[in-house]
Amino acid sequence: MGAARWALLDCTDRFQDLQQMRALMAEHVQLASVVQVLPQLFSVHEVFSHTLQLLHGQHLLEAHAELMMMEHLRDDILSQLHLRGLSSAQATVLSYFSGLQELNESLAKQLWGIVGSSLQLVREDPVLFVTAIRIIEREEKIDDTLLLDATFLPPGRPKGWRQKFYHVLQETITAAHFNAIRMDAEGPGLARHLAALQRDIVSELRVVKDLMVQCVPAHYNILSVCTATYHRALSSHLQDILREDLDKQALFLLLEWVLRMYPSPEVMGHPDLLPEVDVSSLGPLISPELVDQTERKYVEKVKASVLEWMQRTLEVEFKEWFREEEPEVDHQGFFQSALPVIVVQMLSENIQVASLITDSLQQKVYNMALEELEAFLGRLREVLVQCGKEHQKDRTVPKHYVPYLLAMLNNNLALSSSIPSLNPNAACREVPVSLRAALDKMQKKACQLLLEELLLDLQPLYVQLPSRKWLSGSQLVNSMCEVIDKYTKDFSHVRKPAFTLLLMESELLVASQYLRALMQKKMVCKSKEERGQFCDRLLQDATQLRELFCSLGLDRSQQSLEAVFALRELICLKDPALLSLEVLGFITKYPDVSDEHISTLLDLRGDVSKDVRHMVLEMMAQNPQPLPEGFRPIFSTILVPAPELPFCLRKAKCA
């Protein structure tokens, strides 16, 4: 053992020589491996040239087979070199096979060109498309195999051509319909564009469903992919259009197309696409928030249009006031104009059009219509006021001022009765409170202007009473009745609710003005006989006026002239000491009467002492009368002249 040990120690240097021999032998083995593939390597450039020829001749399967063979050769060599750690040799091999990159790019270019024309190819000649799919699937299998072996991954792998197929197909669809320069997004231009989209989407999805599906493996889910692509691209395209400042017609077209047309049997619900295409699984074409925003834009555009139209209608209406003819009458003889029909029809049409889209849009348009109608009534009232002011300056202009005011009252009634029909909810047809108030204001203003006309014609007559001339005859009240009768004949051209109101207001005006005239302190009864004559005249006037209004259809219980009869009783009372009781009964009937009114009435008698006056006023102070609910005031509208101060010619004589 010792001898062996010394012998081995003597061979140490020789062992080092063996290490060098082992390394040299490994190099020779590698060279031998390279020598074995030299015949194939020498043919690489020739194969490159042949493969390019095949590609140019569109012999894609053969070209791809040679390409795979050369890639396999390269990858096999690189794998062996990788295992042996010969990185320098790998670089040489890669440079030698650099032509593969060009072949790959050339083949890919042809493949993506085929994919880009796939919808046309599957209709005309699907062979080329099927060839492209087969090549893509070959490459996918190679990618999958190499990815399973993580020790070595050749350059350019994984190619991911299936994903590239989807990407190219999606880009082609998008570019064909949605990336072009935007068309005129207003009116007919947008309508044509949407019609073209409708036609193309249905046509192309039908091709995918009936033809392309048969040309690709089932796991491609090609119909779902294409459907989702159209949906996403269309959604983005429509959002781009909606960013523009569109008119109301364009906004309506978009809303109708998105919410009604797109999911309908005309597009995604087309019978030829069912049941494979399920539009409900794709989600909304545009978000609910964007739908709401677009609806509001549409309503704003409609509002501007309605405002302009209403203003034009208002201008035309008041131009007609200055015609030489009276306003037109309906079959019942009531004055009218086209204004309510035009306004209601315009609003109704806009509400009905909105119903073709969604209930929410219809409700938005309905709310806007009521707001605009309320604003319109306000503008109409302002024009009435202005027209009334101009008429006061020259009562001959317009010539038929009263008939047109009466027509306006009928128009107001027509509007009031038509408003409920605008409500899309048939179960809720009430007129909103604010709009009802606007209608009431409009009616009151027209009535006020009519009563002002009546008052202007009555005023010269009221100025004459009370007077000695008035006491001596009935001509004054006869003239009043003639004026009232003339106006009420005009009022008969108004429908009953407004006619009754005018009649009541006219009677109140006549009564209050009669009382006002009495309280102007123009006359004081100088004797018992004159007081009796005064009371007789009051009785005759009040009776004649009351009978006139009764004949016109106003019941005695609705008349304010009863106050004249009550006032007469105060003046006719023979014993002034009983005035307190009589006044107490009077203020019970007319709680709005003031002590100034009573004091003035006592002055008319001409025989009331200061003590009696004081007693009466004291009694009134002790018995204040509350105004009952629904009481129609008359005295509170009458102002009593202030008492005259004593006038002195010489200040020195005034105590």
Image: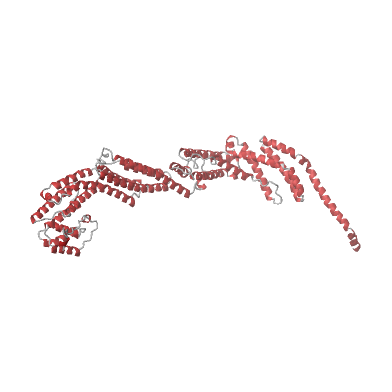
Residue 536 vs residue 357, the one in the foreground:
536
Asked if residue 193 can be seen in this view, the reply is yes
Identify the image quadrant of the C terminus: bottom left
Residue 329 vs residue 147, the one in the foreground:
329
| Residue ID at (69%, 36%) | 54
Where 6 sits versus 124, above or below?
Answer: below
Residue 177 percent location from the top left of the image: 54, 40
Identify the image quadrant of the N terminus: bottom right
In the image, taking residue 577 as reference, residue 79 lies left or right, namely right
Residue 537 percent location from the top left of the image: 12, 51
Residue 523 vs residue 54, the one in the foreground:
523
In the image, taking residue 376 as reference, residue 464 lies left or right, namely left
Asked if residue 278 can be seen in this view, the reply is no
Q: How is the image coloured?
A: secondary structure
Residue at the left extreme of this rendering:
529
Task: Count all numbered tags in the image, as a single digit.
Answer: 0
Where 21 sits versus 581, above or below?
Answer: above
Quarter of the image where one finds residue 346:
top left
Residue 378 vs residue 395, the one in the foreground:
395
Residue 569 percent location from the top left of the image: 13, 56
Quarter of the image where one finds residue 612:
bottom left
| Residue ID at (23%, 61%) | 626
Residue 213 percent location from the top left of the image: 58, 41
Where 215 sits versus 563, above or below?
Answer: above
In the image, taking residue 202 as reference, residue 515 lies left or right, namely left
Where 307 sits versus 615, above or below?
Answer: above
